[in-house]
Image: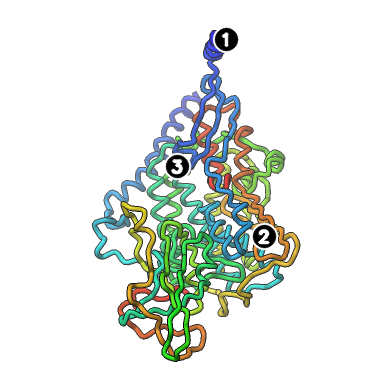
Amino acid sequence: MQEVELQDILTAREDGDYIINIGPQHPSTHGVLRFVVSLKGETLEYVIPHCGYIHRGIEKMCERLTYPQIIHLTDRMDYLSAHMNNEAVSLAVEKGLGIEVPDRVKYIRTILSELQRLASHQLWWAAFGMDLGGLTCFFYGLRDREKILDIFEESFGSRLLHSYICPGGLMNDIHPNFQKRTKDFITYFRKKLPEYDELLTGNIIFEQRTKNIGILSKEEAVGYGLTGPSGRGSGFACDIRKRFPYSAYDKVNFKEILYNEGDTWARYKVRMDEMWESMRIIEQLIDNIPEGDFTAKMKPIIRLPEGEYHQRVETARGELGVYIISTGEKNPYRMHFRTPNFSNLFVMNRLAAGFKIADLIAISGSLDLVIPDIDR
Amino acid sequence: MNSVAQYFSDIFKAIRSLWKGLMVTGYYFVHPKQIVTQQYPENRKTLEMFDRFKGEVILVHDTDNTHKCNGCGICQLNCPNGSIEIITDSAVNEDGKSERIIDKHIYHLSMCTFCGLCVKSCPSNALAFSQEFEHAVFDRQKLTKVLNQPGSKIKKEPKVPKPAPAPAPTPVTEEVPNPAN
């Protein structure tokens, strides 16, 4: 019996066929994600993502918490777009209660979402450059992200997990320095963003590692449910901000970035261009924040009327859907999150099969995966 | 012939693209003043956190060792992780009536996620965040803290309209402004 098994392994080796693990503790999977990879020589035959290493049961935990308490758990799903996650739950609860938040809240929420998107894309750019061998990118990306984190820290007291947007409005009003600091940052970053292009975008090594790697057509992107910048790199117009505007997105003028190539390079370019658009959105809103309350009138204990509520927002990685079933209690009967990374992850096999093993890192980096969001 | 020209132009373009990136890093090499890195453990004495920084939850005490917590337990109810535990006691006040006071306001820092719901929901503005962020300890037990200082009493205040205005400026309260403002 033992001989047969050994024989099998030997034949497999003769063919040059390997099955190996990448992860769960691999720096370029950006967390505890494990890829089981079948190799023929250096060519990928199939890639199976295994998730669940950081499953915390957030959906189940939500069922025993009240709605304001749920907010702090959603921070910990996609920690790089914490504001958007908070906003999604808040909007769903407000939809259920049928209340309208003041304009001031809407404006601030939109500005915060865009600042968060900038910070997220900066970190993605930093890590993507590092994955492909450009360690310098990491320091430059983090240098500029630090400025945004300082703005956050001054206004809400935390840098990563804010729990700032809550059902009915905001936890507290923005800091008096907020507007000035944000404007300073935009003028600063408008000068620094071209540096990103000089460092990485035109680089010949980077171009050859990303162009025509991991190609996905528009139809397949729709079929796989690929959303966010990754989907828009395949020409799938899926920007929730544009298609189903929420908060103050119907008041601003911005462009939905679309590239039709569908390769790693296109996904890279979408995010780079989105940073410019995010800055445009902030500039349109930052001087026009209306005066008023930072929260709507809310009861101390929020009870959603019986029914089902759904709300979707555009996070830095794609469409986040929040689905609440309420039985009229102060905590939800069932809470479900349709997270963007979970859908984006399972396109890996389709993208990577047929390419070389080094391209796997480029492809998974271009999808911008955040593992706690997959497992939640 | 054409392909040879293409070959050399490709090499030239490649070197140019690499040079472009090197120019950026070279610029910062000769402009060290633009580097923003902070030397953390060395600058500990001068390091100042922002006023609203959520370091850890504290019970604000005045200079005469009084606080505003009456032990209503709303922070305990609002905490999503059970990191606040309040043990109440009863005492006889000046009018001869028995009154609820706190015996221990226990705070488990190890369970806290710094969501800020306790500070926001406190009806008497007794809680606040401090700017302390160096929480590393060798013994886990040290992360469980009793927030009310020994011998402290509830502050006797004339009836104030809600929300209570900030107390008279003392060194303690100046350091810890209420994040809810």
Q: Earlier in the sequence, mark 2 or mark 1?
A: 1
Q: Chain for mark 2?
A: A
Which residue is pictured at 50% across the width and 61% down the height? B82
Do the CB atoms of the residues marked 1 and 3 lie less than 8 Å apart? Answer: no
- Quadrant occupied by the N terminus of chain A: top right
Vertical relation: A130 (above or below) B146: above
Three-letter amino acid code of the residue under disc 1 = Met
Nearest the eye: A299 or A256: A299
Q: Look at mark 1 in the image and give the residue it sits on.
A: A1
Q: Secondary structure at mark 2?
A: loop
Q: Which mark is residue A129?
A: 3
Which residue is pictured at 44% across the width and 62% down the height? A158
Three-letter amino acid code of the residue under disc 3 = Gly
Q: Are marks 2 and 1 on the same chain?
A: yes
Quarter where residue A220 is shown: top right
- Label 1 crowding class (10 Å Cα cut-off): few <14, some 14-19, many 20+? few
Vertical relation: B140 (above or below) B2: below
Three-letter amino acid code of the residue under disc 2 = Pro
Q: Earlier in the sequence, mark 2 or mark 3?
A: 3
Q: Look at mark 2 in the image and give the residue it sits on.
A: A332
- In the rendered image, residue A75, in percent from the top left (x then y), is placed at 53, 57
Q: Is residue A87 left or right of residue B52?
A: right
Give the Cα distance between marks 1 and 3. Answer: 48 Å
- Label 3 crowding class (10 Å Cα cut-off): few <14, some 14-19, many 20+? many
- In the rendered image, residue B173, in percent from the top left (x then y), is placed at 35, 78
Give the Cα distance between marks 2 and 3. Answer: 42 Å
- Viewer-nearest of labels 2 and 3? 2
Q: Is residue A184 left or right of residue B35?
A: right
Report if residue A115 is visible in the image: yes
